Amino acid sequence: MALQKIHFISLFPDVIRDGLSHSLIGKAGDKITLNFIQLRDFAKNKHKTVDDTPSGGGAGMLLKPDVLFDAWSSVTSLEEKRLRPAAERPYTILLSPQGKLLAQSKAKTMASHHRELIIVTGHYEGVDERFIDLCVDEEMSIGDYVLTGGEFAALVVADVLIRLIPGVVGSEESVARDSLENGLLKAPQYTRPREFQGLTVPDVLLGGNHAAIEKWRSEQSQARTKRKRPDLWEALKKTKQ
Ligand SMILES: C[S@@+](CC[C@H](N)C(=O)[O-])C[C@H]1O[C@@H](n2cnc3c(N)ncnc32)[C@H](O)[C@@H]1O
């Protein structure tokens, strides 16, 4: 099963829409449907209020559970969430610095296990916990730092997922051979000119011997993973053991 639809619930859906409208992802319209939901449309009063102060005091404002719930219910229902298996209903992700860190392996699983996703972006101090309890299947983080809102995180998550849909990147081989796909970093890459500022393209890449090129790339890939990302190298060794 491949991912076919992503709904974004956000206070700034245009940020996400604009960010996804360029280059390869922008041209993926025939492979995936993107639905942008303005959270403020579900506000309950004429001032279009979507946030309120934290119970018990404290700094900042929280997105209100009823507003979030109604925006979420415009796409799916609690009944569906309770009764239908995740793969058959929209699966809800809340972007949060408290979530599990996104990694390529996780993105691959998600892109192939879910037909439809709802990505909710928080803002201000975050969201009322009851919305998480009721509606969210998974909290996801894009790194151990705190953003002002989830829109840029949504862009990252959506770009990673859409790129994995077959046909979005012209050559599927290039996706499969990119860094992190097999737990390794990709070997150094060069293009013309052959010499630039006194630095030359390695001879092996220009010799036309495909077996030698593959061997060189594999060795370089391992060496640079060991050097640049010893954590990945150790993880790979463990998997092999
Ligand atoms: C200022 S943050 C809220 C942080 C929250 N008060 C806490 O301490 O966990 C506002 C929103 O930005 C988004 N956000 C911030 N950092 C993020 C990260 N590293 N990954 C994903 N989303 C993030 C989330 O949607 C979050 O609700």
Image (tube, grey):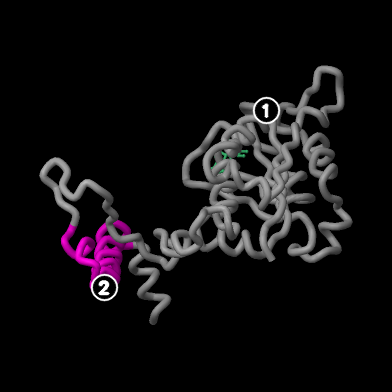
Q: As shown in the figure, which amino acid type bears the numbered disc 1?
A: Met
Residue at image point 35% right, 60% down: 185
Query: For residue 61, which numbered disc appears in the image?
Result: 1
Is residue 218 magenta-colored? yes
**240 left or right of 164 in image:** left
Q: Position of residue 11 (x, y in %)?
A: 69, 30
- Looking at the rendered structure, the kind of residue marked 2 is Lys
Between 65 and 13, the one lying in front of the other is 13
At 77% across and 50% down in the image, what residue appears?
Answer: 135
Residue 178 vs residue 113, the one in the foreground: 178
Residue 236 is drawn in which quadrant?
bottom left
Q: Name the magenta segment's main secondary structure.
A: helix
Q: Is residue 17 above or below residue 45?
A: below
Residue at 62% of width from left, 35% of height from top?
16
Between disc 2 and disc 1, the foreground one is: 2
Evaluate if marks 2 and 1 touch, with contact meaning CB atoms under 8 Å apart: no
Residue 111 in the magenta stretch? The answer is no
Q: Is residue 223 left or right of residue 50?
A: left
**Residue 212 visible from this viewpoint:** yes
Q: Residue furthest top?
A: 47
Q: Residue furthest front?
A: 208
Where residue 163 appears, as percent x and y from the top left, is: 55, 53
Numbered circle sitting on residue 215: 2
- Neighbours of disc 1 within 10 Å: few (<14), some (14-19), many (20+): some
Instruction: First in sequence, mark 2 or 1: give its number.
Output: 1
Magenta part of the chain: 202-230
Return the mark for residue 153.
none
- Image location of residue 46, percent across then percent down: 86, 18
- Residue 15 is left or right of residue 74, and the answer is left
Whether label 1 lies within 8 Å of ligand 1 gets the answer no
Residue in front for this viewpoint, 55 or 217: 217
